[in-house]
Image (tube, rainbow, N blue to C red):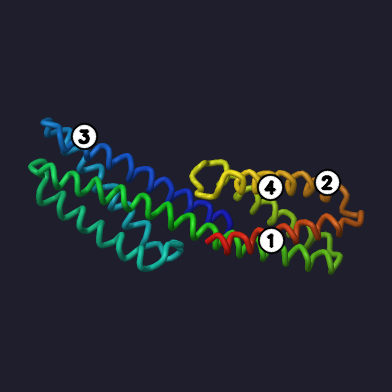
């Protein structure tokens, strides 16, 4: 499930970047007298919107339904304008398509940020609960599984913090990165000494997860 969420987030971020890129191409094409270039830009822009429309039809797409509905409508609009106007499209139409790309790009990034915060908060709490149950049961197999899932979650959080696209303040990002490194280091230590009493360290993981989960929901 974590891999699926990560893939969807990366996919939405890639779409947002492409929308920004094609907004610039459309603005350049609007002033160009080269019909072949105009046609190429319009065709590639429409293909991108068709791909976006296909992605939002995926039942596992995490975007809210109202956003998916709006994206579907905009995709149809882009397709209609592109086919009906073609290279004879006026500069104002090119600018209109470029503006749509920019606005939706920012909207996608905002939705990704909100959805990621919600998903991370849930899984932080879930991983904390799994760690607690494994520790109380004194079951090494359950503990290894819980530690592995918790570490994978924190690796994903660190990856997102390092990509520079999050709107979280720098001090918050840096703290989350440090926590991810702390958890990674101490997870290895626990794994190397499963027979030792690691309850204090595991309790610190649970506490970190709980506080960060609450903080993410509060920030959202």
- Mark 4 or 2, closer to the camera: 4
Residue on which disc 3 sits: 28
Crowd class of label 4 (few under 14; some 14 to 19; many from 20; radius 10 Å): many
Q: Residue 201: image x %, image y %?
A: 83, 55
Proximity of marks 3 and 1: CB atoms separated by less than 8 Å? no
The answer to which of 200 and 137 lies nearer the viewer is 200
Nearer the N terminus, badge 1 or badge 2? 2
Residue on which disc 4 sits: 180
> At 46% from the left edge and 55% from the top edge, which residue is drawn?
112
Q: Could you tell me how far apart the alpha carbons at marks 2 and 3 are, in whole angstroms?
A: 55 Å
Nearer the N terminus, badge 3 or badge 1? 3
Q: Residue 181: image x %, image y %?
A: 71, 44
> At 69% from the left edge and 51% from the top edge, which residue is drawn?
151
Nearer the N terminus, badge 4 or badge 2? 4
Find numbered disc 2 in the image and state the secondary structure of the residue it sits on.
helix
Residue on which disc 1 sits: 211
Q: Could you tell me how far apart the alpha carbons at marks 1 and 4 are, in whole angstroms?
A: 14 Å
Side of 188 where 22 appears, left or right: left
Q: Could you tell me how far apart the alpha carbons at marks 3 and 4 are, in whole angstroms?
A: 43 Å
Crowd class of label 3 (few under 14; some 14 to 19; many from 20; radius 10 Å): some
Residue on which disc 2 sits: 189
Q: Residue 143: image x %, image y %?
A: 79, 60
Q: Is residue 154 above or below residue 143?
A: above
Proximity of marks 4 and 2: CB atoms separated by less than 8 Å? no
Side of 14 where 83 appears, left or right: left
């Amino acid at each position: 499930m974590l891999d699926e969420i990560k893939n969807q987030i990366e996919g939405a971020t890639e779409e947002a970047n492409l929308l920004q890129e094609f907004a610039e191409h459309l603005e350049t094409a609007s002033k160009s007298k080269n019909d072949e270039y105009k046609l190429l830009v319009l065709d590639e822009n429409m293909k991108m919107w068709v791909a976006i429309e296909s992605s939002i039809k995926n039942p596992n797409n995490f975007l809210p339904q109202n956003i998916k509905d709006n994206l579907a409508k905009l995709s149809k609009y882009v397709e209609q304008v592109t086919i009906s106007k073609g290279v004879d499209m006026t500069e104002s139409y090119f600018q209109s398509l470029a503006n749509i790309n920019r606005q939706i790009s920012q909207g996608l990034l905002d939705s990704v940020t909100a959805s990621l915060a919600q998903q991370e908060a849930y899984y932080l709490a879930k991983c904390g609960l799994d760690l607690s149950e494994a520790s109380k049961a004194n079951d090494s197999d359950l503990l290894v599984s819980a530690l592995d899932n918790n570490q994978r979650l924190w690796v994903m959080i660190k990856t997102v913090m390092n990509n520079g696209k999050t709107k979280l303040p720098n001090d918050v990002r840096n703290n989350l990165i440090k926590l991810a490194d702390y958890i990674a280091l101490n997870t290895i230590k626990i794994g190397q000494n499963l027979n030792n009493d690691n309850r204090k360290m595991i309790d610190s993981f649970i506490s970190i997860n709980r506080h960060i989960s609450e903080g993410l929901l509060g920030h959202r």
